[in-house]
Amino acid sequence: MNICAKKFNRSGAIKNNNLFLIEYCNLLKSKYRLNKRVLLVQIPQLVFKSFNPEVVKKKGYYVFPPTGLQYLYEAIKKRDLDIKILDLNFMLLKKVFEEDFDYRQWIDILKEYVDDFDPAVIGVSCMYDLGIQPLMEVLKFLRQRNRSVIITGGVIPTYEGESLLEQDLCHFVIEREGEDRINFLLDYLTDENLNSDPCSGVRFKHNGFYCETEGNGGEVIFDTDLIDSYSLVNIREYCKYGSLNPFSRIAGLENSPFAAIQMNRGCRAMCTFCSVRDFIGKGVRKRSVEKILSEMDFLINKCGVRHFEWLDDDLLYYKKEFQNLLQKIIDKKWEITWSANNGLIASSIDDEMMRLIRDSGCIGFKIGIETGNVEKLKEIKKPATLDIFRKAAKIFEQYAEVFIGGNFMLGFPHEKFYQMMDSFRFSLELNLDWSAFTTCQAIRGATAFSEFEDHFISQIKSEGENVKNFIPTRESSKGQLAVKKEALKGLDVFKLDPKCEPDADQIKEIWFTFNLVGNYINNKNLRRGGNPEKFISWVEMAQVAYPINPYMSLFLSLAYIIKEDFQKAEEYFQKATLSYRTDYWQERFAAFKLDRLMRNFPKNKAEVFEKIDDLRSFFLTVINKHSYVLANYSSNN
């Protein structure tokens, strides 16, 4: 077999040689006396500087199973190896939940595990910027231990591989999809050669040179099930210590197992803010309906799973196949629910699709809108128009049983305030159950951030200290914003110059205002003819992660009055009163006239509607006051 490697020196010169990988693997085998034990590690999916143990006790953190590592296991399970998966995120939440474990000592969980198992090879995955800090800490610990060959992969190592190798934090970096590449590497790292096809994208440092293997760089064949991998992942336990998102909480099965599942890998779109096509490759690959049903049947009947979350970036790409899958789920009469928080592509949704979605057990999903500004929509290459979203929203009105939200982003590169306002006004026009505003994050591999190299370098140099959350209030354990004094707050954000490009602190305040006005004061399910139960189910489950947020409690109290459940209404009003007492929240409430609502709290349904109508009219007047100025800039008019 021709094992080629590209050999990079620091001046960038390239020399071809087919011996570097073999030489390096032989060196490592002699140094570490490798046994047959392999450990795959999922790092904590948490922001430790805002970590709150009380939220853990309420199961408020996300606890996604290590699906990516499960696919890696399925790819290498035929080898004569003793393979285990360690989900540090799950183990940390479990220990804090059960033992009052000091979360700052989380690396001890890894230490205890590797000391006991003593693996020869350890693979560490990191997919998101928020994982940089735990990734660096894990790699540092393992290299200092110096008893195993360390391999790392995922989005962050793919784009920061040279830096990780330069710091001697690992022996190998696996780029992009890992199934074929890790098999190729294991052919030479173990004594078992399965003649795997040579692959590019295995990077390492040898004799002072940065090397990368050559070979097949194509896409992985994506049609396997994860059934065997669940022998390494106790999926029954995950529901005890967290959730997948609010959907998995509102399924009404608090102590019933949930699971993540995937039909497709890849995405048809070429959105400039996303790196899926660069990381996964062009096009969309699918698993067969039979494989998916087999996996679901196993999880339902053997593991007790009652809720599924689709992980796909483009779930509806193979429309007929997905409809066929939904019909078979219906025919099987499984008592399950499912959701798709990642976002569906609106252009693929019609009445027949919605009927199958509803009848197959879907409790909710999001659609990816991102922006309500026509020029920005074209600039980011979103495969949609505003009219496509409007058409979808009309269809959604006929399926009120399903909770439907829209994903919006604020702060695209060079985005002006009037463009953000177009998004806000469009969210009000669509009138969905929820408008999930987030702040735009620079992503490695996305074309919109090709000029952000210094930003990415600083993230690695700071070991993730300056990484920000896409939901601003998650940066604080108290759920509060910390911004500079100059940032306009409350209704004053509408006074911003339409042509300005708001900075990071100002975008946080814009996010706060859009979220509070759009999702609470203007929520359709708190109006006459609305469904307050949908609002209650979503906000109650979201508040698990924000236990001392008083406006959540306040509006939940109003929703319960509409339902005429006055006992629950009083409980939430008292909770709001308790949290409202701080200077921070009193200032926030006054900025949105909510202090008046606290002082003159409604006693019945009619008063709730009257007071919310008054608030809504007041805010719409303020917004419309500035709309004539914004209209001069917006391309939507």
Image (cartoon, rainbow, N blue to C red):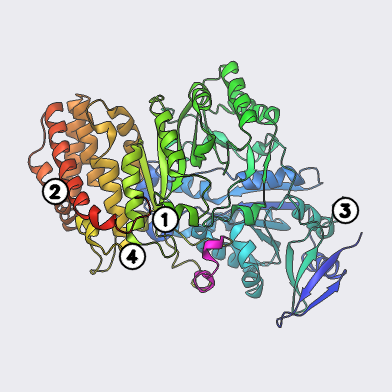
Do the CB atoms of the residues marked 3 and 1 lie less than 8 Å apart? no
- Give the spatial CA distance, label 4 vs label 1: 16 Å
- Give the spatial CA distance, label 1 vs label 2: 27 Å
The tag on residue 193 is 3
The tag on residue 635 is none
* Residue picked out by circle 1: 470
Q: Residue furthest left?
A: 600
Q: Which amino acid does label 3 sit on?
A: Asn
Identified at 64% across, 40% down, the residue is 264
Q: Is residue 450 magenta?
A: yes
Residue 6 visible in the snapshot: yes
Please tell me how crowded label 1 is: few (under 14), some (14-19), or many (20+) other residues with Cα within 10 Å: some
- Circle nearer the viewer, 3 or 1: 1
- Circle nearer the viewer, 3 or 4: 4
The tag earlier along the polypeptide, 4 or 2, is 4
* Residue picked out by circle 4: 502
Is 19 placed left or right of 300 in the picture? right
Q: Is mark 4 on a helix, strand or loop?
A: loop
- Circle nearer the viewer, 3 or 2: 2
Per the rendered image, the range of residues in magenta is: 446-459
- Give the spatial CA distance, label 4 vs label 2: 25 Å
The tag on residue 593 is 2
Q: Which residue lies furthest to the right in this view?
A: 1
